[in-house]
Image (tube, rainbow, N blue to C red):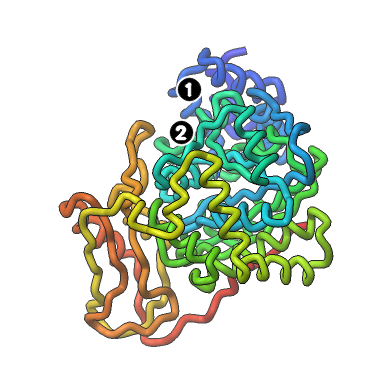
Amino acid sequence: MRMYDIIRKKRDGHPLTDEEIRFFIEGYTDGSIPDYQAAALCMAIYYQGMTEDEMAELTFAIRDSGERLDFSAIKGIRADKHSTGGVGDKTSLVVVPLVATFGVKVAKISGRGLGHTGGTIDKLEAIPGFRTDLSEEEFTECVNRVGAAIVGQTREVAPADKKLYALRDVTATVDSMPLIVSSIMGKKLAADDDVIVLDVKTGSGSFMKTIEDSRKLAEIMVNIGRKAGKKIMALITDMDRPLGEAVGNALEVREAIDTLRGEGPEDFTELCVILSENILYLSGFGTMEECDEKVREALRDGSALEKLREMIKAQGGDSGVIDDENRFKQPKYPHTVLAEQDGYLFHMDTEGIGIASLLLGAGRNTKEDSIDPSAGLRILKKTGDFVKAGEALAVLYADREELFPAAEEKYRSALTWADKKPEEQPLVLGKVI
Ligand code: URA
């Protein structure tokens, strides 16, 4: 079998066989297939798509490219959540401690930022000392003792995805349904969880821009998960405006802490509650109403915040960040973006806002780039707000002042103005069960 023929076959729009898909994933993982051929195949998949059977086989091949985790040493129900990626999406930082408060075990493997979207691992590494590279023994011990741990993708688990993820990030092949399905589900199925709740984003800040594509993505992922014997469901949620007000790593951790204290932005808090109650429900903690009440109580009484403190300590981080935000690395400069006109903020091109944050140093342009944990932006006006000229729209943060002009221009160009208020969009646009 030759990689050249596989690329040509997909380029010409034909479905690949199971053997061809396995040949690609095994060869790319062991290094016998080079990056340039893998990139060419990703681009062919981007343009030609895949059948549901091909997507399932690609998912299982990615799952089988490394170790399958054995969580049998973890006692209790094991659950996970996964988002397809968005801007300001720091839900894992709230949902994981929130559900762990009730004894649900969360052994979570998360990713880094991808394209214009942030990643949980980059966010957690903004906490001084926080280790995302626990050994398997340390990981299991933390989950058993504390109830939850979050680590980065190791070379052992779904290594094909680790390589493909980084390659797609720099070859404009992230926003492809088959590649997203297999990346997310390949990783999820390599882990040994009982319950999976997927947060499928839709809108200008997500990889799937339309509700139809997002629903299809959700349905395919749920079908594959069910085939693999998981209790799984998906929520389709709005990413046509940034989630919450903070975008950027340390800024987002601070917003997650505020939310666990009951002082977070309304949209972000509500989404965390909805995701958490669905995890509790699938894990057998009562009716949806009972799960909703439990989750809200854990935010009110501070127990979820205490669980985050325990998690940070257990992974070597400075849990003092919870009470003192000055323990995070501070950005050297703030820069306020002022409105140049009166009017309603009618739409926010959320991908553009993610890119503005990336331009400030919060994300990567190449696989090798390092990121600035303190960089990012705080949004002061969102879709639907009436703004007067001269009012502050956002504050940008960076270590180098010369980064502000391009980021400000990107931010401004992401905003659409009108003299009427836009229709309100619900946060949850669908559910696939
Ligand atoms: N999250 C992933 O893990 N993979 C993708 O391809 C997109 C989002």
Residue at 53% across, 79% down: 424
Which kind of residue does numbered mark 1 sit on?
Gln
Is 362 situated above or below 191?
below
* Residue corresponding to mark 1: 37
Q: Is residue 407 visible?
A: yes
* Residue corresponding to mark 2: 166
Viewer-proximal residue, 6 or 141?
141
Residue at 53% across, 36% down: 152
Which kind of residue does numbered mark 2 sit on?
Ala
Viewer-proximal residue, 207 or 112?
112
Locate residue 254: give its quadrant. bottom left
Quadrant location, ligand no. 1: top right
Q: Secondary structure at mark 1?
A: helix
* Few, some or many residues within 10 Å of mark 2 (<14, 14–19, 20+): some
x then y, percent, for residue 99: 68, 56
* Few, some or many residues within 10 Å of mark 1 (<14, 14–19, 20+): some
x then y, percent, for residue 30: 55, 15
Quarter of the rendering occupied by the C terminus: bottom right
Viewer-proximal residue, 6 or 222?
222
x then y, percent, for residue 355: 35, 53
Is 152 situated above or below 287?
above
